[in-house]
């Protein structure tokens, strides 16, 4: 998540989510209302510190410069971002995640250089303005069949009602934004997930 996904202090949202049991965090400051420049960096530092205090892996979305500045645990990139081969050379000891939205992208992806795939959007989502077409849980099963050893995390429109279907389809995990940031009670939402 980023500040644009929160109706209140993102630091508080992250703390509550960690207390509730999330197992990893990605700082994704992006889309309308997102911070940039020094404000993005400063919030990133604070969120990074919260994760560090609680031993929660901290990933950053896209931002190669901040990966180094914040010394993140990993970086997550999309198909149009910096190539995973170059990232691997630059950050040999960080986790690298790549988004995959369809079979064409999967076959064109530099899988040798990535640690996991973010697969989706699985369901329709209004969180990402330029989200590609929802692929459904069947695509998870297909990716897992083709690459059984590649860890995959479902993303997009996942909530407490449909998360189980994503896992049953073969995902190793689920990633959510609004199901946590917009939850009336984060403790309950994460517990149900
Ligand atoms: N990538 C594909 S869908 C998505 C991203 C970042 C948005 C996920 O947000 P939500 O609120 O969990 O649907
Ligand atoms: Mg990207």
Image (tube, helix red, strand yellow):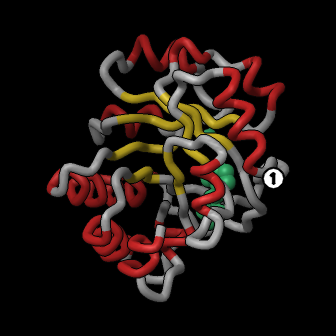
> In which quadrant of the rendered view does residue 185 lie?
bottom left
Across and down, in percent, residue 123 comes to 75, 59
Q: Quadrant of ligand 1?
A: bottom right
Judge whether 170 appears above or below 80 on screen: below
Across and down, in percent, residue 17 comes to 35, 69
Q: Is residue 188 left or right of residue 162?
A: left
Across and down, in percent, residue 95 comes to 39, 29
Q: Nearer the viewer, residue 189 or 31?
A: 189
As helix, strand or loop, the secondary structure at mark 1 comes to loop
Q: Judge the density around disc 1: few (<14), some (14-19), many (≥20) Cα neighbours within 10 Å.
A: some
Tell me what residue is drawn at x 44 percent, y 35 percent.
Answer: 75
Tell me what residue is drawn at x 53 percent, y 38 percent.
Answer: 62
Judge whether 119 appears above or below 180 on screen: above
Judge whether 31 appears above or below 96 on screen: below
Residue located beneath label 1 in the image: 134
Judge whether 63 appears above or below 7 on screen: above
Q: Nearer the viewer, residue 129 or 19?
A: 19
In this view, the residue farthest toward the front is: 168
Q: Nearer the viewer, residue 142 or 17?
A: 142
Tell me what residue is drawn at x 36 percent, y 20 percent.
Answer: 91
Question: What is the number of callouts on the image?
Answer: 1
Q: Is mark 1 within 8 Å of ligand 1?
A: no
Q: Is residue 93 left or right of residue 174?
A: left
Tell me what residue is drawn at x 70 percent, y 46 percent.
Answer: 120
In this view, the residue farthest toward the left is: 53
Across and down, in percent, residue 153 comes to 55, 43
In this view, the residue farthest toward the bottom is: 184
């Amino acid at each position: 998540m980023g500040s644009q996904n929160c109706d209140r202090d993102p630091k508080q949202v992250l703390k509550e989510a960690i207390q509730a049991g999330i197992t990893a965090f990605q700082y994704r400051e992006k889309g309308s209302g997102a911070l940039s420049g020094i404000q993005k960096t400063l919030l990133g530092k604070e969120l990074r510190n919260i994760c560090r205090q609680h031993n929660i892996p901290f990933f950053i979305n896209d931002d190669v410069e901040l990966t180094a500045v914040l010394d993140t645990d990993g970086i997550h990139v999309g198909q149009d971002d910096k190539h995973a081969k170059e990232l691997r050379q630059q950050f040999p000891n960080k986790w690298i995640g790549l988004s995959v939205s369809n079979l064409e992208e999967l076959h064109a992806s530099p899988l040798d250089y990535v640690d996991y795939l973010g697969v989706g959007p699985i369901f329709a989502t209004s969180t990402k303005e330029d989200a590609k077409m929802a692929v459904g849980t069947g695509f998870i099963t297909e990716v897992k069949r083709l690459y059984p050893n590649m860890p995959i995390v479902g993303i997009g429109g996942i909530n407490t009602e449909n998360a189980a279907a994503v896992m049953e389809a073969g995902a190793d995990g689920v990633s959510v934004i609004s199901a946590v940031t917009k939850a009336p009670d984060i403790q309950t939402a994460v517990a149900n997930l």
